[in-house]
Amino acid sequence: MKWRNLYIKLVQWAIVVLAYAYLIYRLVSFDNYETLLYHFNNVGIQQWGYLLLAFLLFPLNICAEAWKWQYLLKDIEPMSYHEAIRQTYFGFVAAFLTPARLGDYPARVSMLKNKQNWITAIAMGFVGTLALAFVQVAAGLPSSLFLFSNILNNAAYKTTIIIIGVATIILLVFLIVFYRKIALLLLPYSLKNEKIALTLRTLSTFSHKRFITTCFMSIIRYIIYCAQLYFVLVFCGVNFTFFQTVIAIPTYYLLVTITPSVPIADVAIRGGWSMVVFGVFTENIAGVALAAVLLWVLNSILPMLVGSVVKKQE
């Protein structure tokens, strides 16, 4: 048991060291410091206020995720809200290093007291991620369809997109009503992948009330994400009307969600999609790209730094 605990500690510290090494690499390889410095030297007090608002939402974002994590694990390993926040922060350290943030939940559960609950806790975490993805798709799909139908500006394309949109919305409603039966049907085909099989097995026993509650918690976090992006865009000199904001931001998050990513290309992917989506409404492409970088710092770098300190002070 002592050797196992020592191994876990070594893995946890290795995660922290690798995260800092990767951060240093990204900082050294970044080649747009002149653009950043020029912008920071030419913004007004009001714009700095918007950036401050975005940063003030950062701890609220973590608190919302910790609340969901505590709720998901209440029947597995009840924990205090403070402990849920601590585990959530440390999860960001591993998520910073792994494709699609897959290291997040294994890092969190490494801090659980009962080691026998690890696998089930990871599956619960993936269910929470699934709920957030469901919210992002449900919010982003209508917005993206409206955006691209206007870009195409063709009656035939618009009709096709509307049909696809209505069909997809019906499918989403079908999934949220029958997700337990669907999970059971898919389970025999996923036995070769232990993580997928366990997630489906967990989902098949998840009550509708609990799943809807998890989705509600995910909606709160999604709203925080959208507000952060809006504030960062305004700070970078990218101004939208209310209608453009409602269309562009959910579309951006939808595209980021469905695009496979690896840490080394995460900023490039986010920056690319931001220019595609927001470039429809503005010519300030430099501001859009800068906003993507700042949002990455806000929601990836800061949690990773805090998570490493939290682990150190254990």
Image: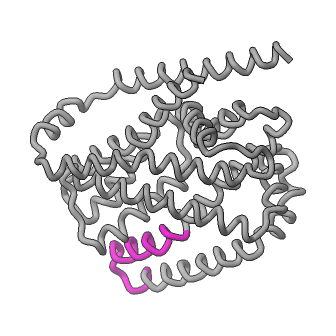
Q: Position of residue 201 (x, y in %)?
A: 84, 55
77 in relation to 19, above or below: below
Whether 145 is among the magenta residues is yes
Residue drawn 65% across and 57% down? Answer: 130
51 in relation to 3, above or below: below
Q: Position of residue 12 (x, y in %)?
A: 64, 23
> Which SS does the magenta portion mostly show?
helix
The magenta region covers 138-157
**Residue 303 appears in the rendering:** yes
Residue drawn 44% across and 69% down? Answer: 144
Which image quadrant: the N terminus?
Answer: top right
Which is more toward the observer, 33 or 306?
A: 306
Count numbered badges in the picture: 0
Residue drawn 36% across and 81% down? Answer: 154
Which is more toward the observer, 39 or 312?
A: 312
- Does residue 90 appear to the left or right of 266 in the view shown? right
Q: Position of residue 82 (x, y in %)?
A: 59, 40
Whether 261 is among the magenta residues is no
- Does residue 91 appear to the left or right of 45 in the view shown? right
30 in relation to 129, above or below: above
**Residue 98 appears in the rendering:** no
Q: How is the image coloured?
A: one colour
Which image quadrant: the C terminus?
Answer: top right
Q: Position of residue 53 (x, y in %)?
A: 30, 51
- Does residue 131 appear to the left or right of 221 in the view shown? right
Which is more toward the observer, 312 or 102?
A: 312
Which is more toward the observer, 294 or 314?
A: 314
